[in-house]
Each structure stands twice: as C-alpha cells, then as structure tokens.
Image (cartoon, rainbow, N blue to C red):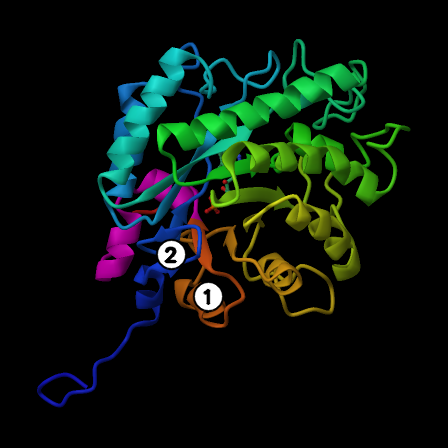
Amino acid sequence: MDMRGNFLCLREVDLLFRPFVHRKICLPTRITMAPLARGLARGGVPGLDMLRYYQQRAAADVGLIVTEPVAVNDPSAADDAGMPHFYGGAALREWKRICRAVQATGCRMAPQLSHAGMLRQADGCGPSGVDPLTLEKRGEPMSRERMRAVVLAFAQAAADARLLGFDAVEINGARSGLLEQFLRASTNLRHDEYGGDLVRRTRFVCEVLHAVRKAVGRSFPLMFRFSLSGRGGDESQLVASPAELETLLQPLCEAGVDIFACTVQDLRRPAFAGSALNLAGWVKMLTRRPVVCEGGVGLPGAELSRLVQLVQAQQLDLLSVGRALHADAGWAASVRLGRKTRDA
Ligand SMILES: Cc1cc2nc3c(=O)[nH]c(=O)nc-3n(C[C@H](O)[C@H](O)[C@H](O)COP(=O)(O)O)c2cc1C
C-alpha cells in the first residue's frame, strides 16, 4: 500500500525492469539486446555509427547488449566484408570506446565471439568442408592444426574482451556458424573423436569453451548461445528429446558456461512434443543456470504479458529482444513507461 492507503498495482512488465543479480554479473534490467549481424564495419573496424546505435539502445532501459557477431582472429572467421573484427589495434580501440559509451549509461555489454566456418564462401573452413546452407561439400575437413588455431583465436578474443572492460563474453554456437557446424550431424561427417555421436560432436565446442574459461578466469561471465532449430540446408532439431538435450548441455556446463542464451522462433512454443516447457525452461531445469531467450518479443502477435509470465514462473531469467529493438531504439523504455512502441 502507498502512504494514502491505496493499493499499488505492480504491472506485470515491471518485473522486467528489476535488476538481474548473479554472482558474476548484475544487470540493471532483464531486457537484453540480441545479437544482430549488420555488416557495417568498414575493413572490420567499428565506426561512430555503431557506437551511436548501441549507445541509444543502452540508454533506453536495456540491461545488457550482446553485440552483433564479431570475428575472432582467423582468416575465415568473417562471412561478410562488413563483419566487425575483434582483433587488431584499430578494431579493439573502437570496441573499447563503444563499450565505455554503453557502460556509461549503466547498461552492460558482451561481444558475441564468432567464427563463420563454411558460411564463408571463398575460403571457409569447417569440420568436414560442408556448406551449412546447401549441405554441399565444397572444402576439405579442418586439420587438427587449424582447429587448434581457432581455439586459440577464441581464447585470445575473450582475454581481450576482459582486458577492454567488457562485462561478459558470448560464444556463438548458433546461426549455422563454425561451432554449430561441429554440433550438427549434417555438417560434421568426421570419423575422428570430433565426429560421430552428439558427445563427440560437442567436443570441439567444449575445447573452445575450456580455452575461453582459462583465458578469462573463473569469475568472468561466460555465455553460450545455441538453437535447436536449424536453418538453410538442415532444418532438423539439433536434439530430439530432453535426454539428448541433457547430453548436449552437461559437457558445456563442465566447460564453464555460466549463462545459456537460447534462440527460438517463438518463445511460447514447447521445445518437445508433449512438454509444456519451451527451450529456455528445459535448459534452466536441466542446468540450473540462468537462461536468456528470444523469439518474437515485441513483434505483432507476441503478448508481452505472457512472456513476462515465463520470467515470473522462473522458466527464463532474461528476455532478449532483436528486431523490435533494432527498429525502435527506445523500445524497452517505451514498454517501461507504457507508451506505444514502434513496429519492427
Ligand atoms: C538480420 C538478423 C541478423 C541476425 N544475426 C545474428 C547473429 O549474427 N548471431 C546470432 O546469434 N543471432 C542472430 N540473429 C538472431 C537474433 O539474435 C534473434 O535470435 C532473432 O532475431 C529472434 O529474436 P527477435 O524475434 O527478437 O528478433 C539475427 C537476426 C536477424 C533478424
């Protein structure tokens, strides 16, 4: 009750604007920005337009910005000439400036460390040289030496993120990139210990995560993004049952993941037939780690109050917003104030 004896009505969405507190990271709100590839970095170096883009969203009630995918230092990490690098003096200096500008608003920031693998057309590399969008073989399997170099590139990028002052790192295991190419049977045809059943296909991802964890230390937050649904050539589910999901998640937890980021098409849809939980709910239940999830938040047809109920029911911790925040920098602030948001 307030001082005049009236009942205060706590709107459901207010829950999204309470801090998220974790032993390794605290966020001012529970709305995070999803990584959205934009391809606007000339020569791999982020420009002032990118600083403004992130700063505007950070200043409007977003708790954590996960950057667009950034390339680790490997010749085929970038799939697009405009993909920002996360290596080299010029790019890292600009990222530090962007990170400071975002943090000055109270928002936190994490780079999404990525490798395109066979998504890169001319000289991509992948577990078996298979293009994830067409499933055609157009290259040789990655050598052990190259795999080791990629592991080191992720570790170096993570160490640099910490040094530059970022609040966390996210490793991109989604969007058909190199790590997902190792996870999926359609792109990983290897006969060595990195191919075969799900546990073996997870091995390279775990090596990356272990190396990243070692590079950033125990107290730095490590996020891992993945998706069950494929895109392009392979639209099958990555795992078919909760038991298989557990098989996938267990080694990832052991490798040091603190927070799982799940990409789904529709947050309200159950992950498996016959289960009421969506992917975030399952991941949270199986790992007991916080989960951030996105899929249509702020788009027409998605009732925000139903999504907030998932946070309330502790089936997910953070609501991630992609297209709606891209279209409207003030989306989160408008939701907080009960104002009309601009359509994505
Ligand atoms: C243009 C565009 C580019 C994207 N690029 C990436 C990416 O590089 N890495 C990633 O993990 N997700 C990427 N995503 C997926 C988004 O992060 C998010 O999962 C998806 O848009 C669903 O969330 P939304 O409905 O809030 O937009 C991209 C989505 C869009 C629309």
In percent of width and height, residue 263 lies at 57, 47
Q: Mark 1 points at which residue?
A: 311
Residue drawn at x 34%, y 47% is 343
In percent of width and height, residue 4 lies at 8, 87
Residue drawn at x 54%, y 66% is 315
Relative height, residue 216 to residue 262 (above, below): above
| Dominant secondary structure (helix, strand or loop) of the stretch shown in magenta | helix
Q: Name the residue under label 2.
A: 30
Q: Does the magenta stretch include residue 339?
A: yes
In percent of width and height, residue 316 lies at 51, 61
Badge 1 vs badge 2, beta-carbon distance below 8 Å? yes
Q: Does the magenta stretch include residue 283?
A: no
Lateral position of residue 232 relative to residue 194, left or right = left
Query: Which amino acid, mark 1?
Result: Val
Lateral position of residue 317 relative to residue 211, left or right = left
Residue drawn at x 14%, y 83% is 2
**Segment tinted magenta in the rendering:** 321-340
